Amino acid sequence: MEVKVLSSKLVKPAYNAGAAPATEYIPLSIFDKVTFRMQMAIIYAFAAPAPSTASIEKGLAAVLAQYRAFAGQIGVNPDDGTPSFILNDRGARLVDASVDADMADMAPAKPTPELLKLHPDLEGELEEVVLLQLTRFRCGSLAVGFTSNHVAADGHATSNFLVAWGRATRGLPMGPPPVHHHKDLFKPRSSPRVEHDHRNREYYWPSATADVGHHGDGADNIVIHKAHFTKDFIAGLRAKASEGRGRPFSRFETILAHLWRTMTRSRDLSPEETSAIRLSVDGRHRLRQPAEYFGNMVLWAFPRATVGDLLNRPLKHAAQVIHDEVARVDGAYFQSFVDFATSGAAEKEGLAPSAVCKDVLCPDVEVDSWLTFPFYELDFGTGSPSYFMPSYFPTEGMLFLAPSYVGDGSVDAFVPVFEHNLQAFKECCYSME
């Protein structure tokens, strides 16, 4: 697929009241500081007739006036050296491109390296927080490649921005404005109580951990498989996992438990090994913060089990392990983290955030669930996208869960696996056993 770049520009915020506000510095929060240093990349597809570039750009300029962090930069406050978001209205990068091919030739597809051509070039030092590419196909369809710096916003905040962008493009009110971090937010208790082992969960000692691939496997033989779970299959899984339980496990708990077991089986691990999941937990409700909070407010649950237990005990066991571990990451857990992160202990002891991007996670798993985010509500005036999916992110064991473009309650799981494990994964992926 040959993509021709037609133009590249910075889209700056458009303020209704005239002059732009002064540059502001918003300090990174304790949650921003422990999140992944990575680009969050999504592909949207819109069928013909697709919205015009002019209308999309006008809506982007309008929404950036409300979401200034996405038009700024990440740096330091010159007054005190504090790592900060610089609200300087530099702008978001917008690339206009075209392809002499039909959208049907590549979509709806599983992520491959080809998808990277639908994003702006991410090589080198990126000065913008948000980069966008509008790629028009011969058939009149449009692909929107959205990339944002994860340090600036988590999935919840980013989905709020995307919905507001669509509304601004359609000339509608964008909804409640984002609520930004400030220095008086996330304060420790008057008598701080660190009640959990944050040193070995959100942080780690860099010298104590070797970042190596499992069994010598490397990143050069990873493929991304898309598994489609129908609504009926999911209902059957939930019934099986929840049998004899008063309240059924959630759709997410059930699918994740099933994939955890399936991946473990396909990896051919020894029964004594332990497998853990890194699972995001949103802290907005737990810390009584508004849904409009813009930034990161995520910590992680770490369900873990031996390979033998995962494979020899029923699906219910894996689902219960996930459920119990997520339940532990409650409001008290978040407050304990606040007390620890603001104490200065991490800096004094030389700890580093444990949210580190790796090529290989085996025997472990990470999951990004987009099942509850309103990504399909991005409407530029010609209707919802025909589908959306993560871009190419070949980290073995890094799962993405998204509502299927079919729109019937089915779910797509994007699963990076070693090529030599793919057949084993396929053989047990749709088994209820």
Image: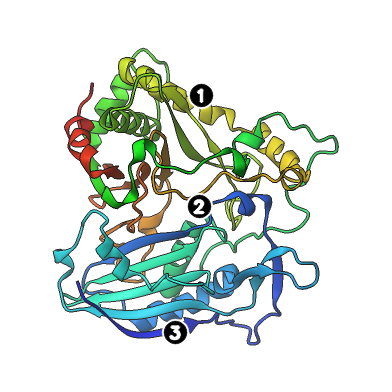
Looking at marks 2 and 1 on the same chain, the residue that comes earlier in the sequence is marked by: 2
In the rendered image, residue 289, in percent from the top left (x then y), is placed at: 65, 47
In the rendered image, residue 32, in percent from the top left (x then y), is placed at: 62, 54
Residue 413 appears in the picture as rendered: no
**In the shown orientation, is residue 205 left or right of residue 12?**
right
Asked if residue 65 is positioned above or below residue 402 in the image, the reply reads below
**Residue matched to label 1:** 324
Mark 3 secondary-structure assignment: strand
Local crowd at mark 2 within 10 Å, few (<14), some, or many (≥20)?
Answer: many
| Cα distance in 3D space between marks 2 and 1 | 23 Å
Amino acid bearing label 1: Asp
Amino acid bearing label 3: Lys
**Residue matched to label 3:** 9
Looking at marks 3 and 2 on the same chain, the residue that comes earlier in the sequence is marked by: 3
- Location of residue 240 by image quarter: top left
Which residue: 27% across, 67% down? 46
**Residue matched to label 2:** 156
Asked if residue 76 is positioned above or below residue 369 in the image, the reply reads below
Which residue: 25% across, 64% down? 114
Asked if residue 48 is positioned above or below residue 10 in the image, the reply reads above
> Farthest residue in the top direction?
244
